[in-house]
Structures are given as C-alpha cells and as structure tokens.
C-alpha cells in the first residue's frame, strides 16, 4: 500500500486521540506532568518508519534514523528545532525510459511549533532536507546530493519526565533533480511521504 495524505492524517488523528484520552491516566502516575516547563530542554533519540514516493505503484520502504533537538515551552505553546539523520531504505523514484533514482541517506533541519496538553504535545514542523540519490537501471549520471523541503505534523507523549514517544507524518519535495539517461539530461520533481514512530530521551 502506498502512503498518502489521507492515510497519514488518519494515523495522526488516531494517535492524537489516544494520547489525549490517556493523559489523565499518566497524570495519576506520580510524574509531574503539570509542570509548565516539562517540554523545555534538549533531547536525543531514534525513529523507524515507512515511506513511499507519490508515484503509482511505488512500494513502501522501511526507513530509520536518529534525531537531536531542543524545545522551549511558553505556557501551553512549544517551539523548537530538530536535526535528523536518516536512511531511506531504498526508496525509488521512476524517471522514465527504464531509469530510476534511489534515495539513500538524508539529513534534515526543521523548526517545530505546537500545543502542549500536559504530557501530550501536538505539533507541526517545516524545514530543509538534503538527500543522496543513486542512479539505477538506465541512469548513467553520477550519484549526487539534492536539497529540498519538508513539512508535516506529529503527536508526542511523555511517558516519564525524561522519556517520550512520538508518531509523525512528513512530506518531502525535491524539485529539479537532474539525471542522465542515454546521454540525454532530464529533470524531475520528486515527492515522498513518510510515517514514523520514535523515542526521545530528555536531558
């Protein structure tokens, strides 16, 4: 099944509803989730998920990586930034005439802004991504890095004062990615969708 916006929206809606419904139970666990600064501070963690391109017939591929970031809380509102390194797991884009580009490694720098409901944080994110593309099939051009932009939304739940889990949807766009097939240069706009879950450790 290829990921799409409706699938991602449904997954995030279910996750957010479940997180909010469980907030009261976690508040009775002895952890001070009412602390107005509970989301403030640095964190590091890892994630795993699945992604696909927006092309017909694209297959979902497992992706995973690590992230570090910092949040600052102002009342119920939270802003922050995050840097992520990830492996796309062989995500491919067809570029015509038997050629394909395979996305491998990527690095992302994103801004985040959200609303805190005690131990649950609902947020949106936007930023810049740089990814490496390798030629497959009839593509004869060299492997290269290309920069695009990404946006998405997520829900994060604090399990303890220092550990939280998240589910997140992102869409990433790379415009004007060049490739050469049979000596002829071409350019394609590449789009992928990803849903991931992860853990963050705060310090």
Image: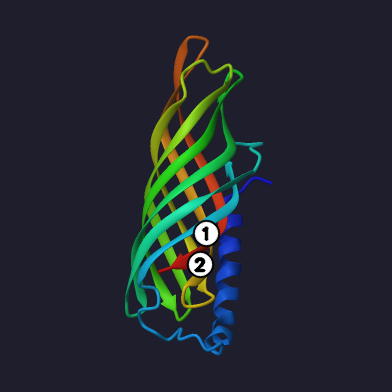
C-alpha span from label 1 to label 2? 7 Å
Q: Nearer the viewer, residue 8 or 120?
A: 120
Q: Mark 2 Cα within 10 Å, few/some/many (few <14, many 20+)?
A: many
Residue carrying label 1: 168
Q: Give the residue at x 47% y 12%.
A: 184
As helix, strand or loop, the secondary structure at mark 1 comes to: strand
Q: Mark 1–mark 2 contact, CB under 8 Å?
A: yes
Q: Give the residue at x 32% y 80%.
A: 75
As drawn, the residue found furthest toward the right would be: 1
Q: Is residue 174 above or below residue 21?
A: above
| Mark closest to the chain's N terminus, 1 or 2 | 2
Q: Can residue 178 be seen at all in this image of the molecule?
A: yes
As drawn, the residue found furthest toward the top would be: 183
Where does the image place residue 62, in percent across and percent down from the top left?
Answer: 62, 45
Q: Mark 1 Cα within 10 Å, few/some/many (few <14, many 20+)?
A: many
Where does the image place residue 146, in percent across and percent down from the top left?
Answer: 40, 33
Where does the image place residue 65, in percent across and percent down from the top left?
Answer: 52, 49
Q: Quadrant of the C terminus?
A: bottom left
Q: Examine the image and state in which quarter residue 173 appears.
A: top left
Number of numbered discs: 2
In this rendering, position of residue 77 left or right of residue 200: left
Residue carrying label 2: 155
């Amino acid at each position: 099944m290829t990921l799409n916006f409706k699938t991602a929206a449904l997954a995030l809606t279910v996750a957010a509803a479940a997180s909010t419904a469980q907030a009261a139970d976690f508040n009775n666990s002895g952890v001070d989730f009412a602390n107005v600064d509970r989301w403030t501070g640095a964190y590091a963690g890892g994630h795993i998920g699945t992604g696909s391109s927006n092309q017909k017939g694209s297959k979902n591929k497992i992706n995973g990586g690590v992230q570090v970031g910092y949040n600052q809380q102002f009342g119920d509102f939270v802003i922050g930034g995050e840097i992520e390194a990830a492996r796309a797991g062989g995500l491919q884009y067809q570029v015509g005439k038997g050629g394909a580009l395979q996305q491998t490694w990527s690095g992302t720098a994103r801004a985040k802004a959200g609303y805190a409901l005690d131990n649950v944080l609902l947020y949106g994110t936007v930023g810049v991504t740089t990814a490496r593309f390798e030629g497959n099939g009839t593509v004869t051009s060299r492997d290269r890095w290309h920069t695009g932009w990404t946006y998405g939304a997520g829900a994060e739940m604090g399990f303890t004062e220092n550990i939280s889990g998240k589910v997140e949807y992102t869409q990433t766009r790379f415009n004007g990615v060049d490739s050469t097939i049979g000596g002829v240069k071409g350019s394609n706009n590449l789009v992928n969708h990803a849903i991931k879950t992860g853990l963050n450790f705060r310090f």
